[in-house]
Image (tube, coloured by chain):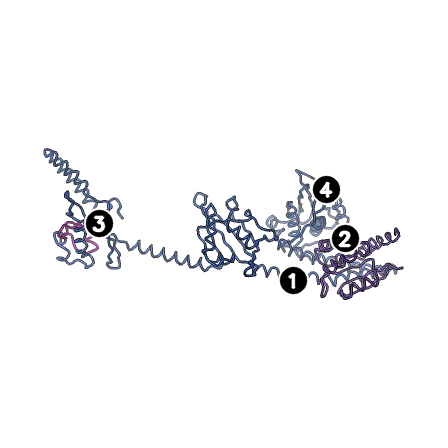
Amino acid sequence: MKNKIFIFDDDEAILEAAKIILEDKGYQVKTFFNFDDIFDQIDLHRPQLIFVDLWMPKINGEDIIKNLRQKYNKDILSIIVLSANRDTSKIAKNCGADDYLNKPFDISDLEKIVDKYINKHINRQFIA
Amino acid sequence: MLYLFSPRRLSIGNFMQLKKGFDQNPNNIDNIINKLNQQIQSLKNVLLASEDQIAIYDQKHRFLYANKAFEMITGVSTEKLIGKTSAQIKLPNVFKIGRKLTRVLKTGRQFTGELKYKKHIFEYVLTPILNSNSSSSIILGTFRDLTKRVQVEKEFKYAKTQMEVILKNLADGIVVFNTKGDIVYFNDSVWKIIFLHSSEDFLKMKNIRNIIKYLAKDLDATSEQSKPISINDSPTLRVLRGEFEPQAIFQIFSSKENEKRYISIKSRPVIEDEGNFNLIVSIIEDITQQKELEERKDEFINVLSHELKTPLTSIKAFAQILERKFRSSSDLHAQRLLSQINFQVDHFSKLVNQLLDTTQLYSNNLTLYKNAFKFNDLVKETVSEISKIDTCHNYIVNYRADVNIVADRNRIGQVLTNILSNAARYSPQNAKVLIKISAKDNSLVVSIKDFGIGIPQYEQNKIFDRFYQIRKTIYHHDPHLGLGLYISSQIIKSHGGIIKIKSQESKGSVFYFTLPIQ
């Protein structure tokens, strides 16, 4: 079974680029340009890792992450903040995300962070 | 004016003394008459020399004496006056003061009045000179020209009113305190700015300490960094602790009016001749509008830099994806071009970050994420990064110390990168850049020396200013905003360190910075 990754960003070019990079690495990637149905989608597809942009239409990414964190703990779902904000690291810490990636990013950094968190889930499954 | 001889203090005490002597010792009469004459002569001299107009009247209002000044002003010579009443001569009407003389004679009390003559204002005093049986015999009249004094008083009063009107209508609040912190003076703007409804409300507080208490408790005053304020934040009290012109910016909120304001308070001692001061002037300014504009500007730059980075993100990602694809196709030319795109995107996003940093630094919002780390590791990383991009300079590090510091690693890395790329920017190709890490007195000292064009003396203290660029470099053509050193100096300062430069034109520069070792 392929590991699933969700990416939430309102910029379609970023979604496309990230999808290409991560699919090349063999992950199953689903992209969203808003937070509509986010809980249903997660419950349905059960991704191990999601990327969340902070400045999104309608709902603030920070608030969504806080809500997600209440429902899914870090063992079930890793959440990475993906943002062009200068204070991304602080915001990520405050809202309960696992990590952050600043925009613009180096694709090797994107790959590294994905490997790190997906491996965590693989190891856990293995132990279980 | 003559004050030696004040008419108010005049009595015939001297004469009485003489008379007493005369009564007791009639044999010595010549001697006494001599003395009396001397006294009268000196008295006459004094009267004559006086700038004040002086006249002496007898019981029937007749002139016994008038001095030169009296003659000058009335235009009537002394000879014509003596022995006559003012009704009998052509004296200007205002000097005809018969009724007042009658009153003085009747009451035996001094009379003071004012009269106007030819645009001059005179104050006159009629002093009864008493006999031994306590009845008035003669009256001394002195007239003093007050025109100049009245004019000066008028001007002073006008200036004072003018000043008061200006202070009262000034949009800025002004409070003057004494060195106890008690309110001495204030204008209306003060109490209006701090949400009070009358000057009485303000006056009730009496002392600066109560004003600060009111700001802190009733208006939830906070500093610019949103921390609650304390007594020690008061610029007025800071003046008393020896500061010259302390300033504070507070945010205040009135729950009654549901309004937020930013106020700036600046205090200064009113220095007197010997350098001492008894008063402190505080100026309170409502800077809400200015602050809101600044906030809007900052917000705009925030959004702008975010929006600029969004397309950069996909450009960079697509360029890197393509670069990888061409790597396998061994098209070196395409690979090089794509890595150029990548490099330029990085440069662009660095510029955007600098712009954002400057905004945050300017509004004191730079947040530091401090952690303990090995400083030399950061130097190694930074130098290796920069050597990858810039292969035409020779970076040599001399590690004289190896310490852990507690600081914002990213920000300090930014400072190193800034100074190193500056060194390269202003140095010829293949030149050395020497980096030395040492420790002294609980401080880490970093020096970065280049052998470039150097900075002229007169520019050296400006290079840490915002947007300051030292002339176009002759070696490189990469665009930059002139923000790097400003940001670096602010980062070092907010860590409690010092940043300095030593430079000699056409020889090179040395940048030093220190960071505290905990």
Q: Secondary structure at mark 2?
A: helix
Q: Kindly indicate whether the residue at mark 2 contacts the one at mark 3 (C-beta within 8 angstroms).
A: no
Asked if residue A73 lies left or right of residue B513, the reply is: right
Q: Camera-side residue: A11 or B342?
A: A11
Chain of the residue that carries numbered disc 2 in the rendered image: B
Q: Which mark is residue B404?
A: 4
Asked if residue A73 can be seen in this view, the reply is yes
Residue B54 falls inside the magenta stretch: yes
Residue A73 falls inside the magenta stretch: no
> Mark 4 Cα within 10 Å, few/some/many (few <14, many 20+)?
some
Q: CA distance from mark 2 to mark 1?
A: 32 Å
Label 3 sits on residue: B110
Residue kind at label 1, given as amino acid type: Phe
Q: CA distance from mark 1 to mark 3?
A: 80 Å
Q: Camera-side residue: B311 or B169?
A: B169
Q: CA distance from mark 4 to mark 3?
A: 91 Å
- Are callouts 4 and 2 both on one chain? yes
Label 2 sits on residue: B389
Q: Kindly indicate whether the residue at mark 2 contacts the one at mark 4 (C-beta within 8 angstroms).
A: no
Q: Chain letter for blue?
A: B
Chain of the residue that carries numbered disc 4 in the rendered image: B
Residue kind at label 4, given as amino acid type: Asn
Q: Which mark is residue B300?
A: 1
